[in-house]
Each structure stands twice: as C-alpha cells, then as structure tokens.
Image (cartoon, rainbow, N blue to C red):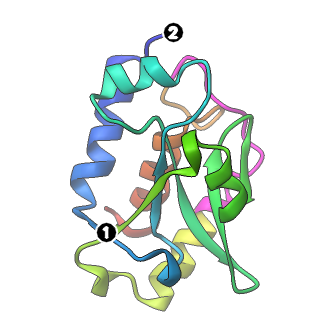
Amino acid sequence: MSPAPWARAATAAVLSALSLAAAATADVQTGDLVFQQSRSAQSLAIQQATHSPYSHMGMIVMRQGAPYVLEAAASVSYTPLEQWAAQGERGHYVIKRLRDDARLTPAARTQLANAGAAFVGKPYDLVFAWSDDRIYCSELVWKVYQRALGV
C-alpha cells in the first residue's frame, strides 16, 4: 500500500521544518529523532513514496535516565532504544536533533514528552489518514513537535 500524498508531505515537513543535525548516540536527549529502515511489509512502499532510505521514525524520550523511542508501530508506545534499533535492517539507525538546539530547553523537552504521552495507546494508521484516532510514525512526531513547540 502506498502512502497518501500528504503522508509523504508530512514526512518531508518533519525533515525540513526541524532543520535536523546529527546527534551522537551517547548524547541522546528527549526530542531527538531516530530513523531506520524497518522490516515491515510496507517499508519499500514508504521509501519509494518519500524518496528516503528510511521508512520508520520515532522520537527519543528519556525515562528514568534511559533512552526510549516513542513510536507508532502496532500502537503508539515506548520502546527501549536498543530494542528499537535491533528491529531495523541490520540494526542501523540515525539520530537527528534540531540544529538550533537552544530551543530544546529542559521545559521544551518536558513539553515534548508530555505531548507525546497524549498519543500513547493510539492504534497505527494503515491508511495514513490525518486524524488523532489512528496515527503513523512521521505524523506522530510532526504532531508532537507542532503541539509542544509550534515547530
């Protein structure tokens, strides 16, 4: 199934509006974005539609000092970063952060975590509709950043 045109646009918006810069794995923080090539059945269709080597993404949320990925998979949930990485092709993933990371104050990171928590439990959106009833990965990250920080 090919993502709807606005699904591609949402992914592009996440990438361009955030002005991403690489972040070191050892220095992950709430709000960092992670990208991987998933092993899902729709991975190739997503890559072709978005013109990206990556087909899945999430946002880091630090929980009890450990990095978790807030992701939309079967449902929106938190997955330990190491486990999330192992689920991708060859365990490869990249971490990105806002270039203007001065915007990511402790208060802003808390806002991101809280905005993300509001989506936990929502089912995955297989048809890439733009609603809060069901949600897909890049839509989740876009909405979290938009609602928390207006980005």
Q: Is residue 59 above or below residue 133?
A: below
Q: In this view, does 21 lie above or below 48?
A: below
Q: Is residue 89 above or below residue 22?
A: above
Question: What separation in Å lies between label 1 and label 2 (alpha carbons)?
Answer: 31 Å
Q: Is residue 93 magenta?
A: no
Q: Residue at x 53, y 46 (%)?
A: 140
| Quarter of the view holding residue 23 | bottom left
Q: Which secondary structure is most common in the magenta stretch? A: loop
Left or right, 144 with reference to 120: left
Disc 2: CA contacts within 10 A as few (<14), some (14-19) or many (>=20):
few
Label of residue 64 in the image: none
Q: Which residue, given by chain and number where applicable, does mark 1 sit on? A: 22
Q: Which residue is drawn at 62% across and 26% down?
A: 40
In this view, the residue in front, 71 or 132, is: 71
Q: Position of residue 18 (x, y in %)?
A: 28, 60
User: For numbered disc 1, what is the local secondary structure?
Assistant: strand
Q: Position of residue 135 (x, y in %)?
A: 59, 35
The part of the chain drawn in magenta is 116-128
Q: In this view, does 123 lie above or below 109?
A: above
Q: Position of residue 30 (x, y in %)?
A: 54, 75
Q: Position of residue 33 (x, y in %)?
A: 45, 61
Q: Are marks 1 and 2 in contact (CB under 8 Å)?
A: no
Q: Is residue 117 magenta?
A: yes
Task: Name the amino acid type tagged 2.
Answer: Met
Left or right, 78 with reference to 114: right
User: For numbered disc 2, what is the local secondary structure?
Assistant: loop
Q: Which residue, given by chain and number where applicable, does mark 2 sit on? A: 1
